[in-house]
Image (tube, helix red, strand yellow):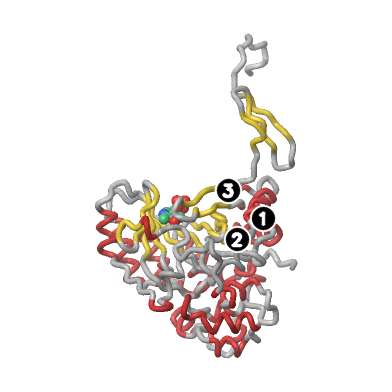
Amino acid sequence: MKESKAPQDWYRGQGHWAGVPAAQWQDYRWQLRNRVTTVERLREFIELTPEEEEGCAHANKKLALAVTPYFFNLIDTDDPDCPIRKQLVPRGDEMRVSPEELLDPVGEETAMGVDGLVHRYPDRCLFLVTNMCAAYCRYCTRSRLVSNAEGHDFHPNYENALRYIEEHPEIRDVLLSGGDPLLLSDKKLDYLLGRLRAIPHVDFIRIGSRIPVFLPQRVTPELQDLLRRHGPVWISIHVNHPRECTQELYDAAERLSFAGVPLGNQSVLLRGINDDLETMRELVHRLLRMRVRPYYLYQCDLITGSRHFRADVRKGIDIIRGLRGFTSGYAVPQFVIDAPGGGGKIPVNPEYIEEINDDEIVLRNFAGDIYRYPLRSREPVPAGVGMLV
Ligand SMILES: *Cc1c(COP(=O)(O)O)cnc(C)c1O
């Protein structure tokens, strides 16, 4: 797949919804109302494989099916292996649970300060503000909480969580997540950001959101204003494959950047979707063109029914090794495993240290060559004339 570098060639248009007036297409409320949420609707566009039929038959018990028309158009409906399709269309494998898999894969429940607030690290917390998303990633790490499937109820109690943050002066960094915080109304977001900004010890606010990817129309002038007013607010978006980097996403990222929002990206390493160097290189380069700095690459959590998504950790390490030094440092994300049971994010890196002792560190560079850096100073000698100038 040789793709154009120019964002203006990434435009996807209205595709299956070609007859819809542009004003509606660009209205995020229309996009939400017209999401593909039933297997019948899916079948109108895609000839489902038996594996997908099986997945759809059970989908709403575990995690709701929903795809915005805009994002649906990125699916190559003729290709059962399409990397977009595999992220959004349920498959039977989701219902098959391996013994190592967990309902709460990264141990969030045991670190809840109050309901809906995970306080794992010393100076920062994760504030789950909604259980709704614009579309549902089939490998969702929080499928136990989001989308209300199978009656999982989650009613974030903002006041309890805000009080917890107010009463914990060690919290200087609050990460809003969910669900997708940018699915909240401007009014609610305004309220939440306002309350957080009013807490003197909170000096860093960020939002984790896939809205710019699933629903770029949501990044309205009003949202720009709001984010600018409460800024600096940082946003981590979630892009997994270069095909998601459309002109529409480019424009939404630009609107966010111009509203003063620094942008990062969090990808999940997904088997058969992005677990190869070529795909990742194309992805991170496109992200940089959109002013988005690749932040984390996650090893897929041990979510129930995720075996078909999980790539070999060694592939992730090889991808990082293939990027570091071969492309801009800004393009290289940190590969991490969010430790099962609640250890938090642990970096997983290719090994560049060959040896370290009291005398020296022996390093291997990106090209495989060996370099040495002394750790022990030797006796100084008088500098010769010319050595110091
Ligand atoms: C990911 C995460 C954070 C933020 O971690 P950073 O490494 O600072 O991005 C905070 N709290 C929880 C519970 C998290 O999972």
Secondary element under disc 3, as helix, strand or loop, is loop
Label for residue 315? 1
State the separation of the CA atoms marked 2 and 3. 13 Å
Of label 1 and label 2, which has the lower sequence position?
A: 2
What residue does disc 2 label? 269
- The image quarter in which residue 10 lies: bottom right
Label 3 close to label 1 by CB (< 8 Å)? no
Local packing at callout 2 (Cα closer than 10 Å; few below 14, some 14-19, many 20+) is: many
Q: Earlier in the sequence, mark 2 or mark 3?
A: 2
Q: Give the mark nearer the N terminus: 3 vs 1.
A: 1
Where does residue 252 sit, x and y in percent of width and height? 51, 68
| Residue labelled 1 has its Cβ within 8 Å of some atom of ligand 1 | no
Specify few, some or many for label 1: CA neighbours under 10 Å numbering under 14, 14-19, or 20 or more. some
Disc 1 and disc 2 in contact, CB within 8 angstroms: yes
Q: Pinpoint residue 287: horizontal percent, then vertical percent.
A: 59, 60
Q: Quadrant of the C terminus?
A: top right
Residue drawn at (41%, 63%) of the image: 177
> Which element is circle 2 on?
strand
Q: Residues within 10 Å of mark 3 (few under 14, many from 20)?
A: some
For disc 3, the marked residue is 348
Secondary structure, mark 1, is helix
The quarter of the image that holds ligand 1 is bottom left
Could you tell me how far apart the alpha carbons at marks 3 and 1 are, in whole angstroms? 11 Å
Q: Amino acid at mark 2?
A: Leu
- Tell me, yes or no, if residue 5 can be seen here: yes
Disc 1 residue type (three-letter): Lys
The residue closer to the viewer here, 91 or 280, is 91
9 to 278, vertically: above or below = below
